Image (cartoon, helix red, strand yellow):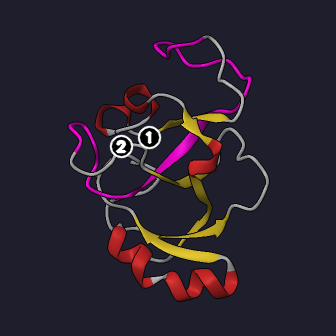
Amino acid sequence: MALAVAASVALWVRTGMMVTVVRGPSMQPTYHDGDRLIALRRRWAVPRRGDVVVFRNPLPAGVPGSSEGPLLIKRVGAGPHEAAPAGMTADRVPAGHLVMLGDNPAQSLDSRHLGFIPVDNVVATVVRRLNR
């Protein structure tokens, strides 16, 4: 995913859009490894439950359990002040945070492992998949 993000920097700066590539099975069946996605830069709005977003990985590279990429693609499972899914450290999502979940829970590094994700980590919202 890092290569796709680096290659799309010019597009990002000029239009507020980025093209990123899905790596791994965490978003199946919605998106598959190698799918290219168009995402729009997050401005001030907080993403809503159900949105698929690109966000900065809160675990630095090299930390056990971390993904190899600096960016992750997941679906927003819950927003600030909403009920948190079972197994989270709180009953409600704290202000300024989100729950991020992969569509393929058995193969996803998401909030079940990472905890609540700061809204400020969200880089962009996915708007569509490019043709395969």
Quadrant placement of the N terminus: bottom left
Q: Secondary structure at mark 2?
A: loop
Compared with 59, 105 (above or below) is above
Name the kind of residue labelled 1 in the image: Gly
Q: Where does residue 9 sit, x and y in percent of width and height? A: 51, 82
Residues at badges 2 and 1 in contact (C-beta under 8 Å)?
no
Q: Where does residue 2 sit, x and y in percent of width and height? A: 35, 69
Q: Where does residue 34 sit, x and y in percent of width and height? A: 33, 68
> Which segment is the magenta one?
63-90
Residue 86 belongs to magenta span? yes
> 50 left or right of 117?
right
> 118 left or right of 106?
right
> 4 left or right of 38?
left
Label 1 packing within 10 angstroms: few (<14), some (14-19), many (20+): many
Say which of 67 and 125 sits in front. 67
Compared with 10, 73 (above or below) is above
Residue 75 belongs to magenta span? yes
Residue 59 is tagged as: 2
Residue beneath disc 1: 102
**Distance of mark 2 from mark 1, alpha carbons?**
16 Å
Say which of 39 and 64 sits in front. 64
Residue 36 is tagged as: none
